Amino acid sequence: MAASFLLKGDRKQNKVFIIVAFILLFAVMGLRNVKAIGNDSSGTNGSYPIIYRRAGNYGWGALISNAVDRYNIGFMLFSKLVFEITGGDYQAFITIVSLIVMLVYSRFILKYSPSPIQSILCFLGLLYYLLLFDALKQALAMATLLLSFDAIVEKKPIKFIILTLLAAFIHFPALIFIPAYWIAQIRIGQRYIAVLAVLLFLTYVFRDRLLNLMLSAYGSDSSASMQGIRFLRNKALIMIAVVAFAVFVRPPAPKDTLYNALLMFAGIAIMFQTFCGYNNIFERLADYYFHTSIVFIPLIFEKGGKSESRIDTARNERIISYATLLICVVAIWRFLSYVNNAGAFNPYRFVWQ
């Protein structure tokens, strides 16, 4: 009932839904028991409480001159600021980070998604909500990159570069998003999709050699061996399925700039995801591009889009309802498969319950 009510595309209804979703998701994330919930962010044995206290104990000048975590100095300065304001209250720090991140994500969904309910389901099902619980540096960096997306749409490269550098200031790997502005300007068609498909296939086939080449260029003597093949069976396959389905259902058109940009981002994310079995840093890099899929997936079913869809959603809203149901089922499956994993910790279960 809620889905059918909210899938009509009424701006006011969408706004009400996003406000309710924001309150619920922020309350769970920001007001959680920091001593019991989290791995890296846990107040008992996590790394972030240590980073937070370390930033607070340094003076402003010493924090910069001593190059404490120099690759993420922006996060250290932010931690220092919150530490000074709150008197070192770690719970307040988590609450402030959660508030900033959820506000930005809610704004991004409301502004660009044709179906906020589908976007929220993707946000949960792709586990980005859970990622934001623990990866605090990446959470703030991803939120900053979502703000930079406005500059892509508005074609303001200087604004985009400033915001992307700010994100990299917080979490250095966010620098990988710098090419996104120019990638988004590419007018893609069937030929570009074919080239992208071949490129993705070659990346997968030669991933060992490519990684060894990167390691050699970096000056590392490490030899790469593929581990964690499970990544290629779940998240990577979900990405590939989404892109393939998108190209079939809503082929890219030259004037459909928003949809085309997000489609290209998804393709780049697949390339990075191919390497994540070596090191989870590649999954982090992939997430910087693929987290925009929380809007991209609903755009596939958008009514009255600039590109011609093979599904006549304007006349048959039942298709959108079925799509929402499918996204919901996948979201539940993804979530349960994570919380039942031996590497996960039980307190995360309450998020869905």
Image (cartoon, rainbow, N blue to C red):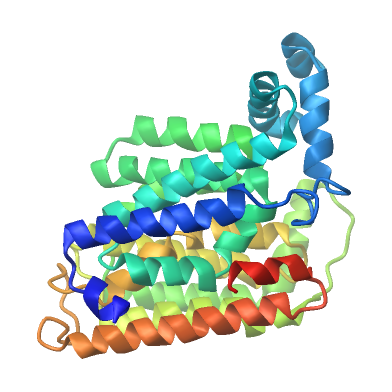
Residue 12, percent from left and from top: 19, 57
* Residue that appears at 55% across and 81% down: 332
How many numbered circles are shown? 0
Q: Residue furthest top?
A: 61
Q: Quadrant of the C terminus?
A: bottom right
Residue 351, percent from left and from top: 61, 67
Residue 23, percent from left and from top: 45, 53
Nearer to me, 272 or 136: 136
Q: Is residue 278 left or right of residue 153?
A: right
Q: Quadrant of the N terminus?
A: bottom left
Q: Residue furthest left?
A: 315
Query: Residue 104's quadrant in the figure?
Result: top left
Q: Is residue 117 left or right of residue 344?
A: left
Q: Is residue 187 visible?
A: no
* Residue that appears at 23% across and 75% down: 5
- On screen, residue 74 above or below 123: above
Q: Is residue 21 visible?
A: yes
Nearer to me, 100 or 259: 100
Nearer to me, 61 or 259: 61
* Residue that appears at 74% across and 9% down: 61
Query: Residue 39's quadrant in the figure?
Result: bottom right
Nearer to me, 289 or 1: 1
